[in-house]
Amino acid sequence: MKHGAILITGGAGYIGSHVALQLRARAERVVALDDLSRGFRQAVLDVPLVVGNVGDRDTVRAALDAHGVDTVMHFAACTVVPESVGDPLKYYLNNTCATRSLLQCCLEGEVRHFVFSSTAAVYGIPAAGVAAEDTPTSPINPYGSSKLMSEWMLAAVAEASPLRYVSLRYFNVAGSDSGGRIGQATPNATLLIKVACEAAVGKRAEVAIFGTDYPTPDGTGVRDYIHVEDLAAAHLDALQYLRAGGGSTTLNVGYGHGYSVRQVLASVERVSGKPLKVREEPRRPGDPPALVARAERIRRELRWKPRLNDLDTIVRTGLAWEERLLRNPW
Ligand code: UD1
């Protein structure tokens, strides 16, 4: 059966561009939509790019029709937790309202499959810091609630129409393309591994540890860090699952084990061979102490097989990318 094209919203962003790269490697027809507010034109490589906002219905409808899209993968979003605490309406507009608009276009354009970029932040502070898909959702920041509201809309739309979806709740995504072609280029990055790699290559003077008094083994925050290429592969598995007739589902994407901030910094020092200058700071607003996935379901339902499940490997690709950005900035 001939499949339609895949629209990747946020296709010039960090995760969307890695998914586009893998889809192109499988000879899928792909079109990226990105307003380039946070994405980079360089990141889409040879994928056709429509420059526009995912909340703009005319642009989205035109892209769906022009490219014969039957699958949408929706990455376009604001993703910085502390920013969402300070400016919640930005998050409800760009994440929740924009997803509503996109879903309306999908219904009008008879899109059949939808893969949604959700987040572990929907769980808030789960008991013992571990979350399975049926752990009650209880976000503690507007970023998490803006994504959870989108999950709810998507589920209701799927009940009321033939559209089927996979919502992927990402844990902490890090690293970059092992071929060195693309990576995360966000200015003023806030994600720990990116920040620590920037410090290791001399782009920042030091790294702050936000909180050393958490109830975790070494007092610093614990997260389930997952390589962006394994995460991207989960989207291809989701596509295959939906094409094979799989029912709508919501799945964690994580490795199922966590590392503390101090363990991450030790890995960056080990891989780079250089000590980092570290500053201890108070807790950051909106941060849970620990957040680790129960991650069996995605392996079972999508047959997802992670290949880069190793902290030093994640850090190595992150460092290589920062070195490349120093030589050749985006
Ligand atoms: C959050 C979201 C995640 C989202 C991501 C995107 C939660 C629980 N998770 O990840 O779903 O995809 O943002 O932005 O809301 N840290 C430092 N120093 C730094 C940076 C971070 O100590 O300079 C610490 C944080 O306090 C945290 C850990 O490192 O304990 C990871 O933080 P970060 O990389 O920013 O990701 P999350 O906030 O966990």
Image (cartoon, rainbow, N blue to C red):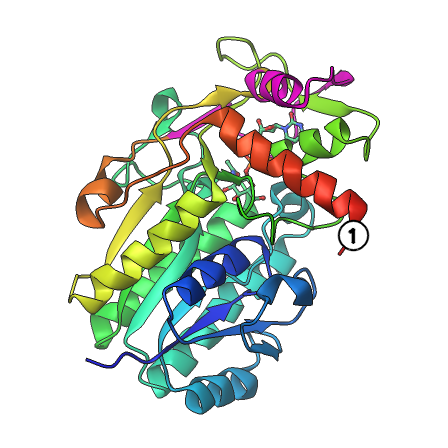
- The residue drawn where x is 36% and y is 56% is 235
At which x and y percent is residue 42? Answer: 67, 64
- The residue drawn where x is 40% and y is 44% is 230
Front residue of 223/48: it is 48
Report the image quarter containing ligand 1.
Answer: top right
The residue tagged 1 is 329
In magenta stretch: residue 195: no
At which x and y percent is residue 17? Answer: 54, 60
Quarter residue 321 falls in:
top right
At which x and y percent is residue 124? Answer: 45, 36
Q: From where the camera sits, is residue 279 visible?
A: yes
Front residue of 59/3: it is 3
Front residue of 247/238: it is 238
Quarter residue 265 falls in:
top right
For the C terminus, the image quarter is bottom right
At which x and y percent is residue 2? Answer: 24, 81
In magenta stretch: residue 277: yes
Q: In the drawing, does residue 274 fall left or right of residue 112?
A: right
Say above or below: 165 vs 180: below
Say above or below: 265 vs 178: above
- The residue drawn where x is 52% and y is 25% is 312
Q: Which residues are magenta?
A: 263-292
> Does dot 1 land on a helix, a strand or a loop?
loop
Quarter residue 71 falls in:
bottom left
